[in-house]
Amino acid sequence: MVVGEKLHMNRETMIAICFGIGLGVLVGVVVLFQTNKGEETKVIPITRENDQQKAVDEDVPANASGTNLSVSSPANNSIVSKNSIEIAGVAKKNSLLVIQSASAEKIQKNENEEFKVETPLAVGENVIQISAYSDSSTPQEQTLRIYYIPAE
């Protein structure tokens, strides 16, 4: 009887080992394929400002009357000590201007070609996106980085 129990125990042990190996392989395959899917969704295309500007310029017809968007002040990468800044520039008449930053979002219709918009700033770096929508649904955009460092 002892020999039979030993044989029966070895058979159960072998079944458990095979089941464990099979389950381990299955879990490994699932993890492998799930990891690849996660990496595919994390791909973020990187564009340089020059490439983006070229793409915007190509959309503007050569015979377009007036400039769609040009920001005259403030200069990009300016450092200021006030908690707000006036953005001034030129955009096509009757275009829709959208000024977006982390602190505020302003939308206004540009009645004449020149515009001035006061926008608040947060302490540190402020990325301000200015978009002008004129005749098409594709806007002309310009990004400013303004650094607000309060006076001590």
Image (cartoon, grey):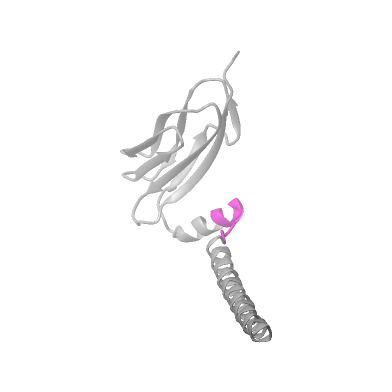
| Residue 101 horizontal side relative to residue 78, left or right | left
Q: Pinpoint residue 108: horizontal percent, then vertical percent.
A: 32, 38
User: Residue at coordinates 41% horizontally, 33% vertically from top-left?
Assistant: 104
Bounds of the magenta segment: 43-53
The question of residue 51 being in magenta is answered with yes
Q: Pinpoint residue 30: horizontal percent, then vertical percent.
A: 55, 72
User: Residue at coordinates 38% horizontally, 39% vertically from top-left?
Assistant: 113
User: Residue at coordinates 52% horizontally, 20% vertically from top-left?
Assistant: 82
| Residue 132 horizontal side relative to residue 150, left or right | left
Image: 107 above or below 22? above
Disc count in the image? 0
Q: Pinpoint residue 67: horizontal percent, then vertical percent.
A: 44, 47
Image: 126 above or below 52? above
Question: Which residue occupies the extreme top position in the image?
Answer: 152
The question of residue 8 being in magenta is answered with no
Residue nearer the viewer, 91 or 87: 87
Q: In which quarter of the image is residue 63?
A: bottom left
From the image, which quarter does the N terminus lie in? bottom right
From the image, which quarter does the C terminus lie in? top right
| Residue 68 horizontal side relative to residue 22, left or right | left
Residue nearer the viewer, 6 or 33: 6
Image: 43 above or below 96? below
Residue nearer the viewer, 22 or 101: 22
Image: 14 above or below 58? below
Q: Pinpoint residue 17: horizontal percent, then vertical percent.
A: 64, 77
Question: Which residue occupies the extreme front position in the image?
Answer: 1
